[in-house]
C-alpha cells in the first residue's frame, strides 16, 4: 500500500527535521512515514490542538505513542494472538460498573471516614502565600483558610498569576502557556446497538467533532431497562473561538447533525441533549513550551508548603492514572520527605506506555528486572486495588 511504501521510503531516506527542530510532524513521519501521518495523525491532532503539527512539540507523540510502532500495529491487525498486546491496542478494560466517578466517590468516603473533610461547591480564587511559603487558600468569597501544605490542581497559569511577588520572567512565561477548551455534547440516542467501540476518533476535517464516546459500551449497568445509548461528542476550541460562545441549543443541533453526517445515528434518533463546557483542560505542547515551563518549575520548587499536580496543575497531558500516581507520590513527599520528582511523571516513567494488559484488563509489568520504577508501579496498582474495595 501507499502507506507501507511511504514508511519504507522514510526508513531508507528519512526527512530531516526543519532546522534541527523535532516536532510532532517530524517525529511521526520518521516513525510511520509521511503517508500514514497525513491520513491518520495530522487532521485529528490539528483538530485537537488548534495549531499545525509542525508547530506542535514532539513531546505529545513521545508521551502518547512512545514505543508503539507500525510493526506492532500490523502485527495486531493480522494476528489472532492477543497475549502481550500493547496498551495502545487493548480492547479490554477494567472499568467501574457505574463509571469512573465511583473511584472518586470512594476516595471522598475514605477521607470522611478517617477524619478528613471534603468541601464541595467551594470555589478557590488563589493560593495564599507569604514570601516563598504557601500559607493556605483564598476562597472566592474572600475568606482565607490557613494550611500547613497546599496541593494545587488548578490550572498552572492561574495558580502562578495568583501568587504574590512572582518575578516578571515567571509571570511572562505563565501568560505565554496555552490551554485548549472542550465542549461536551451529550446525546441520548434511541438505539442500544450503535457501534461496538468504546469511542471513535473522527479524523475528517469536514466535521468539527473530534471524538465520540459510547457509554453503553463502557458500562451497560448504567442503563437498566433503557433501550438507548448516551454518546458524548467532544469539540475542542480556544476561548476566543466562536464555537465556545455558542448556546446549548446550537451545540446540541450541531452534535445531531454531525452524528448523522458520520453515519452513526440519524438526527431523528437523537432525543435529549446536554452540554458541558470545560475550560483549560488540554495543555498545549506548542514548540518552545518546555523553555516557558522551566522557569515556572524552578520558581515553584522554591516555594515551601506547595505542591502542584495533575493535568492542569503541572501542565502535563496526563491520563487519570498519571494524575492518581502524582497524588500518591505527592503524599509520600509531604508525609515522609520521599523526594519524588513529580515533574517526571508522564515524562520519564517508562512503564506508562510500555506496559502490557492482562486478561483482567489490568496492567502488568514488562520483564524489566530491577527497574527503578517497579516499586512505584506496584504501589500504584496496590492503591488502585485498595480503592476498588473500600
Image (tube, rainbow, N blue to C red):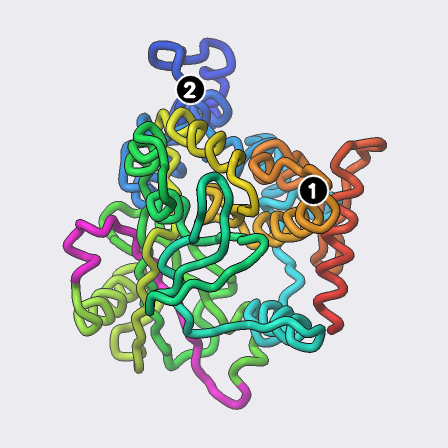
Q: Is residue 370 above or below residue 382?
A: above
Residue 203 shows in the view: no
Q: Is residue 370 above or below residue 151?
A: above
Q: Position of residue 151 (x, y in %)?
A: 54, 53
Earlier along the polypeptide chain: callout 1 or callout 2?
2
Q: Is residue 52 above or below residue 126?
A: above
The residue under the point 53% across, 35% down is 301
Q: Quadrant of the C terminus?
A: bottom right
The residue under the point 72% across, 56% down is 362
Q: Please identify the residue farthest to the front as the structure is shown.
A: 130
Q: In which image quadrant can residue 369 be found? A: top right
The residue under the point 40% across, 24% down is 291
Lateral position of residue 265 relative to residue 148, left or right:
left
Question: Secondary structure beneath disc 1?
Answer: loop
Q: Which mark is residue 214?
A: none
Residue 10 shows in the view: yes
Q: Dot 2, how many residues are within 10 Å of its Cα: few (below 14), some (14-19), or many (20+)?
A: some
Q: Position of residue 246 (x, y in %)?
A: 16, 64
Q: Which mark is residue 355?
A: 1
Work out whether residue 208 or residue 365 is closer to the camera in this orientation and state it.
Answer: 365
Q: Position of residue 339 (x, y in %)?
A: 69, 37
Alpha-carbon span between mark 1 and mark 2: 26 Å
Lateral position of residue 46 relative to residue 383, left or right:
left
Question: Secondary structure beneath disc 2?
Answer: loop
Span of residues in magenta = 224-245
Work out whether residue 372 or residue 49 is closer to the camera in this orientation and state it.
Answer: 372
Q: Which mark is residue 22?
A: 2
Amino acid at each position: 500500500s501507499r502507506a507501507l511504501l511511504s514508511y519504507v521510503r522514510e526508513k531508507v531516506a528519512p526527512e530531516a527535521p526543519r532546522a534541527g527542530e523535532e516536532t510532532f510532524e517530524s517525529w511521526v513521519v520518521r516513525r510511520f512515514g509521511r503517508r500514514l501521518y497525513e491520513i491518520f495523525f495530522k487532521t485529528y491532532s490539528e483538530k485537537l490542538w488548534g495549531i499545525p503539527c509542525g508547530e506542535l512539540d514532539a513531546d505529545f507523540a513521545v508521551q502518547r505513542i512512545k514505543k508503539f510502532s507500525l510493526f506492532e500495529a500490523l502485527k495486531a491487525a493480522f494476528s489472532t494472538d492477543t497475549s502481550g498486546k500493547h496498551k495502545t491496542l487493548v480492547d479490554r478494560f477494567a472499568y467501574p460498573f457505574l463509571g469512573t466517578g465511583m473511584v472518586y466517590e470512594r476516595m471522598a468516603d475514605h477521607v470522611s471516614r478517617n477524619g478528613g473533610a471534603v468541601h464541595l461547591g467551594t470555589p478557590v480564587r488563589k493560593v495564599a502565600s507569604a514570601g516563598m511559603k504557601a500559607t493556605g487558600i483564598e476562597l472566592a468569597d474572600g475568606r482565607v483558610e490557613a494550611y500547613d501544605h497546599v496541593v494545587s490542581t488548578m490550572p498552572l497559569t492561574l495558580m502562578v498569576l495568583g501568587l504574590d511577588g512572582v518575578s516578571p520572567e515567571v509571570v511572562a512565561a505563565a501568560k505565554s502557556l496555552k490551554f485548549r477548551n472542550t465542549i461536551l455534547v451529550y446525546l441520548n440516542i434511541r438505539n442500544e446497538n450503535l457501534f461496538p467501540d468504546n469511542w471513535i476518533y473522527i479524523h475528517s476535517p469536514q466535521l468539527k467533532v473530534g471524538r465520540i464516546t459510547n457509554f453503553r459500551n463502557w458500562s451497560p449497568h448504567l442503563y437498566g431497562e433503557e433501550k438507548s445509548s448516551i454518546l458524548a461528542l467532544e469539540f475542542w476550541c480556544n476561548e476566543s473561538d466562536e464555537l465556545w460562545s455558542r448556546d446549548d441549543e446550537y451545540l446540541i443541533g450541531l452534535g445531531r447533525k454531525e452524528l448523522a453526517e458520520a453515519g452513526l445515528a440519524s438526527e431523528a434518533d437523537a432525543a435529549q441533549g446536554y452540554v458541558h463546557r470545560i475550560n483549560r483542560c488540554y495543555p498545549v505542547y506548542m514548540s518552545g513550551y518546555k523553555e516557558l515551563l522551566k522557569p515556572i518549575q524552578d520558581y515553584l520548587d522554591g516555594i515551601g508548603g506547595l505542591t502542584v499536580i495533575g493535568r492542569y496543575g503541572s501542565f502535563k497531558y496526563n491520563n487519570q492514572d498519571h494524575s492518581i500516581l502524582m497524588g500518591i507520590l505527592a503524599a509520600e513527599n509531604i508525609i515522609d520527605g520521599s523526594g519524588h520528582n513529580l515533574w517526571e511523571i508522564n515524562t520519564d516513567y517508562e512503564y506508562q506506555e510500555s506496559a502490557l494488559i492482562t486478561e483482567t484488563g489490568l496492567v502488568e509489568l514488562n520483564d524489566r528486572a530491577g527497574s527503578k520504577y517497579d516499586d512505584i508501579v506496584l504501589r500504584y496498582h496496590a492503591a488502585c486495588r485498595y480503592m476498588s474495595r473500600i
